[in-house]
Image (spheres, rainbow, N blue to C red):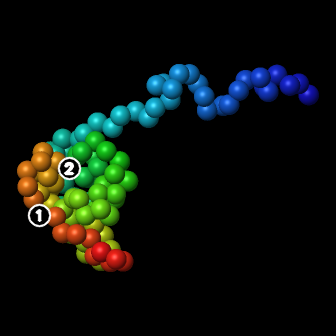
Protein backbone atom coordinates (compact mmCIF):
# COMPACT_ATOMS: atom_id res chain seq x y z
CA UNK A 1 0.00 0.00 0.00
CA UNK A 2 1.24 3.45 -0.91
CA UNK A 3 0.98 6.76 0.99
CA UNK A 4 0.73 8.93 -2.14
CA UNK A 5 -2.73 10.38 -1.33
CA UNK A 6 -1.80 11.61 2.14
CA UNK A 7 0.03 14.65 0.76
CA UNK A 8 -2.88 15.76 -1.44
CA UNK A 9 -4.56 17.84 1.30
CA UNK A 10 -8.31 18.15 1.96
CA UNK A 11 -10.47 16.96 -0.92
CA UNK A 12 -12.86 19.91 -0.76
CA UNK A 13 -10.19 22.57 -1.28
CA UNK A 14 -9.75 23.00 -4.99
CA UNK A 15 -8.36 26.48 -5.22
CA UNK A 16 -8.55 30.01 -3.87
CA UNK A 17 -11.46 30.88 -1.61
CA UNK A 18 -13.32 32.77 -4.37
CA UNK A 19 -13.44 29.67 -6.55
CA UNK A 20 -15.16 27.65 -3.79
CA UNK A 21 -18.12 30.04 -3.43
CA UNK A 22 -21.54 28.91 -4.55
CA UNK A 23 -22.79 30.09 -7.89
CA UNK A 24 -25.00 33.15 -7.53
CA UNK A 25 -28.67 32.47 -8.09
CA UNK A 26 -30.26 34.35 -10.97
CA UNK A 27 -33.75 35.81 -10.49
CA UNK A 28 -36.45 34.17 -12.60
CA UNK A 29 -38.80 36.50 -14.54
CA UNK A 30 -42.30 36.73 -13.15
CA UNK A 31 -43.71 35.54 -16.48
CA UNK A 32 -42.10 32.13 -15.88
CA UNK A 33 -43.84 31.65 -12.51
CA UNK A 34 -47.50 30.90 -11.67
CA UNK A 35 -49.76 33.92 -12.08
CA UNK A 36 -52.20 33.36 -9.21
CA UNK A 37 -50.31 32.22 -6.09
CA UNK A 38 -46.70 31.46 -5.20
CA UNK A 39 -45.11 29.00 -2.84
CA UNK A 40 -41.77 29.42 -1.06
CA UNK A 41 -39.79 28.13 -4.02
CA UNK A 42 -41.47 30.60 -6.40
CA UNK A 43 -40.64 33.58 -4.17
CA UNK A 44 -37.05 32.36 -3.86
CA UNK A 45 -36.68 31.96 -7.62
CA UNK A 46 -38.22 35.38 -8.32
CA UNK A 47 -35.85 37.05 -5.83
CA UNK A 48 -32.82 35.01 -6.90
CA UNK A 49 -32.41 33.68 -3.35
CA UNK A 50 -32.67 30.36 -1.53
CA UNK A 51 -35.74 28.77 0.03
CA UNK A 52 -34.04 29.22 3.41
CA UNK A 53 -33.89 32.99 2.83
CA UNK A 54 -37.67 33.05 2.35
CA UNK A 55 -38.29 30.90 5.44
CA UNK A 56 -36.10 33.19 7.57
CA UNK A 57 -38.09 36.24 6.42
CA UNK A 58 -41.36 34.46 7.22
CA UNK A 59 -40.09 33.53 10.70
CA UNK A 60 -39.06 37.13 11.33
CA UNK A 61 -42.39 38.48 10.06
CA UNK A 62 -40.65 40.56 7.41
CA UNK A 63 -42.39 39.24 4.27
CA UNK A 64 -46.13 39.23 3.51
CA UNK A 65 -47.58 35.71 3.42
CA UNK A 66 -50.67 33.64 4.15
CA UNK A 67 -50.59 30.32 5.95
CA UNK A 68 -53.28 27.72 5.34
CA UNK A 69 -53.13 24.15 6.56
CA UNK A 70 -49.45 24.49 7.40
CA UNK A 71 -48.49 25.66 3.88
CA UNK A 72 -47.16 29.13 3.07
CA UNK A 73 -48.71 31.09 0.20
CA UNK A 74 -47.64 34.40 -1.32
CA UNK A 75 -49.46 36.87 -3.55
CA UNK A 76 -47.21 37.56 -6.57
CA UNK A 77 -48.23 41.24 -6.87
CA UNK A 78 -47.63 41.88 -3.17
CA UNK A 79 -44.24 40.14 -3.28
CA UNK A 80 -43.20 42.15 -6.36
CA UNK A 81 -44.08 45.41 -4.58
CA UNK A 82 -42.42 44.26 -1.36
CA UNK A 83 -39.15 43.44 -3.14
CA UNK A 84 -38.87 46.91 -4.65
CA UNK A 85 -39.51 48.53 -1.28
CA UNK A 86 -43.07 49.75 -1.68
CA UNK A 87 -45.07 49.61 1.55
CA UNK A 88 -47.16 46.47 2.09
CA UNK A 89 -48.90 45.14 5.20
CA UNK A 90 -46.94 42.40 6.94
CA UNK A 91 -48.70 40.27 9.54
CA UNK A 92 -46.46 39.26 12.44
CA UNK A 93 -45.99 35.50 12.84
CA UNK A 94 -48.23 33.74 15.35
CA UNK A 95 -47.13 31.10 17.76
CA UNK A 96 -44.59 30.56 20.48
CA UNK A 97 -43.92 33.87 22.16
CA UNK A 98 -44.97 36.11 19.29
The x and y percentages for residue 71 are 30, 70
Near mark 2 (Cα within 10 A), the count class, few <14, some 14-19 or many ≥20, is: some
Q: CA distance from mark 1 to mark 2?
A: 23 Å
Q: Give the farthest residue toward the right.
A: 1
The x and y percentages for residue 66 are 21, 69
Say whether residue 8 is left or right of residue 55.
Answer: right
Say whether residue 63 is left or right of residue 78.
Answer: right
The x and y percentages for residue 22 are 44, 35
Say whether residue 21 is left or right of residue 49.
Answer: right
Element type at marker 1? loop
Quadrant of res 89: bottom left
Q: Work out whether 23 lies above or below 34.
A: above
Observer able to see residue 72: yes
Quadrant of res 79: bottom left
Which disc, if any, is residue 33? 2
Near mark 1 (Cα within 10 A), the count class, few <14, some 14-19 or many ≥20, is: few
Say whether marks 1 and 2 touch (CB < 8 Å): no
* Quarter of the rendering occupied by the C terminus: bottom left
Which disc, if any, is residue 28? none
Q: Work out whether 69 lies above or below 9.
A: below
The x and y percentages for residue 25 are 33, 37
Question: What residue sits 23% from the left and 46% below the top?
Answer: 46
Quadrant of res 5: top right
Residue at mark 1? 89
Question: What residue sits 25% from the left and 52% below the top?
Answer: 43
Amino acid sequence: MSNENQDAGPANETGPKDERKRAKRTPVPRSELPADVWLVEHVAKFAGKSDGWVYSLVAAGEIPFTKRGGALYFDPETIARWLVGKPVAVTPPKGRGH
